[in-house]
Amino acid sequence: MGGSRVRVGGVAIGLVLTCGSASAQDDGQTADAGAAQMSAMTREGSGTSWLPDSTPMYMVHRQRGPWMLMGHQNAFLQYLRESGDRGAHQIGSINWLMAMAARSAGPGHLSLRGMVSVEPWTIRGCGYPDLLASGEVCDEEAIHDRQHPHDLFMEVSAEYDRPLAGTIRWQLFGGPAAEPALGPVAYPHRLSAMPNPIAPISHHWLDSTHVSFGVVTGGVYGTRWKVETSAFNGREPDENRKDFDFGALDSVSGRIWWLPTPTVTFQVSGGHLHGAEGTEPRHDVNRVTASATFHRLTNTRVAASTVAWGRNSGHGVGTNALLLETNLTFNDRDTWFGRLELAQKTPKELGVLDTRNTFTVAKLQGGYTRYFTRAVGWKAGIGGAVSASIVPSQLSSAYGGRMNPGIAVFLTLRPAIMAGDAHAAPSGSPPTMVMVQTAYDAAKLTCPAGFDPGTAAMTTYEGKTYYFCSAADRDKFLTDPRMSLSMMPPKQ
């Protein structure tokens, strides 16, 4: 999710997020540790992956003593129809719910996560119709032209990080169900994919390991970079979606992140997945990925795009997949989304008998969602999408034509943008979350170099005096004091 790592020391976490400007970022000089921790709130994606610092948050949150509790979910009630000889139609629900709890722990920070889906009950059979999709197993055969349902337990994990030297921190993450350091942010957590209920056909070339039953990840990171590595169970989950499919941690991966500006993230990663494929005999897969994510916020608009490439190599065959994905939302109400994919797939992955090594297939999709006025921090919406699945002439007879259209109609529910204690902005613009760093003692503030606690800006609110790094922070605090104070631990 457009995440929520928090610092709960002697000061409130500082972050200013509006749809009128991007999140604050250092101006090219080395930022201090406090600034790094602030930007981490919006930077956090799935597992240990990163989103741009300008990512808005879609969540609800509450402070309970030293714990910051957060929730995020996305749910669809959809009707899907794919045409052609391999087409099908289905009514079902694609859904997931994530909860997080975070607090200080000694000199570092601890966060606990749980993520579940009821798709084992709301998606019938081997999955929902999605022409050209492939991956995992059902009824002892490789799934094709359908997207498998998610497991009940999508994540059960913990994360701890603490300072290492200066602005550099180290991080330890893992759990019985978690995501290793491999690939871009998983599609359920990408802002560019958020309004789209359908999984990409390139999923198993990019981010399919986002549900791995056994993960340990270690990394070090600074204000603009991260290097991390994982040991994990690389086997695909079986068709029993309600249990844990534990295995040896005999797969490995590594990933590098770079955030040159607040609006962009880049990652490159690679991994060896031991016995990944679920059909017998199992085969190892070597995966390499690269991706770039771009976010842009204005007074009335949130724009998010992802470009990603992945390559799988195994049992003598190498295949590539390319994804271009975008989402443009106006006033947290009107959302247009689109996706273009090219993928090389083997006859086995497409369920055809052929002597060729691979086929290049393509899928184009576009859609619109209209969200309604939020109620208690939640947004309901109605939307639809159309798609075109394109295959080479050699597969025309198997699919009933080279191009097969599809449609989707759905209801959806998610948190409002920057939901929680955020106030609604005037003139119909999106709600704005304002959180700035404040303290009862100016000496406890974490401010840029040159800050003089003796001249700190201050204000009195409800009979208490608060200090700030700048007059601008004080003015932002006064626009919504309750939000900043909700992030501040009780006075000792």
Image: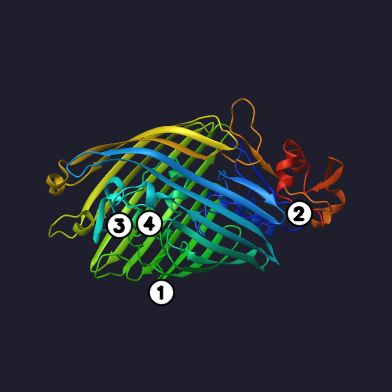
Q: CA distance from mark 1 to mark 4?
A: 22 Å
Q: Residue at x 13, y 49 (%)?
A: 394
User: Which mark's residue is nearer the viewer, 1 or 2?
Assistant: 1
Vertical comparison of 237 with 69: above or below? below
Residue 405: where, in percent of width, then height? 25, 37
Q: CA distance from mark 1 to mark 2?
A: 42 Å
Q: Circles 3 and 1: CB distance less than 8 Å? A: no
Q: Disc 1 residue type?
A: Ala
Residue 376: where, in percent of width, then height? 60, 36
Q: Circles 3 and 2: CB distance less than 8 Å? A: no
Residue on which the image places disc 4: 206
Q: Residue at x 71, y 67 (%)?
A: 106
Residue on which the image places disc 2: 11
Vertical comparison of 370 with 132: above or below? above
User: Which mark's residue is nearer the viewer, 3 or 4?
Assistant: 3
Residue on which the image places disc 3: 135
Left or right of residue 322, residue 302 in this image: right
Q: Quadrant of the C terminus?
A: bottom right
Residue on which the image places disc 1: 248
Q: Circles 1 and 2: CB distance less than 8 Å? A: no
Question: Of the residues under marks 1 and 2, which one precedes in the sequence?
Answer: 2
User: Which mark's residue is nearer the viewer, 1 or 4?
Assistant: 1
Q: Disc 2 residue type?
A: Val
Q: Circles 4 and 2: CB distance less than 8 Å? A: no
Instruction: Assess disc 4: are there few (<14), some (14-19) or many (≥20) residues with their C-alpha within 10 Å of its C-alpha.
Output: many
459 and 211: which one is in front? Answer: 211
Q: Of helix, strand and loop, which one carries label 4? A: helix
User: Which mark's residue is nearer the viewer, 3 or 2?
Assistant: 3
Q: Disc 3 residue type?
A: Gly
Q: Of helix, strand and loop, which one carries label 3? A: strand
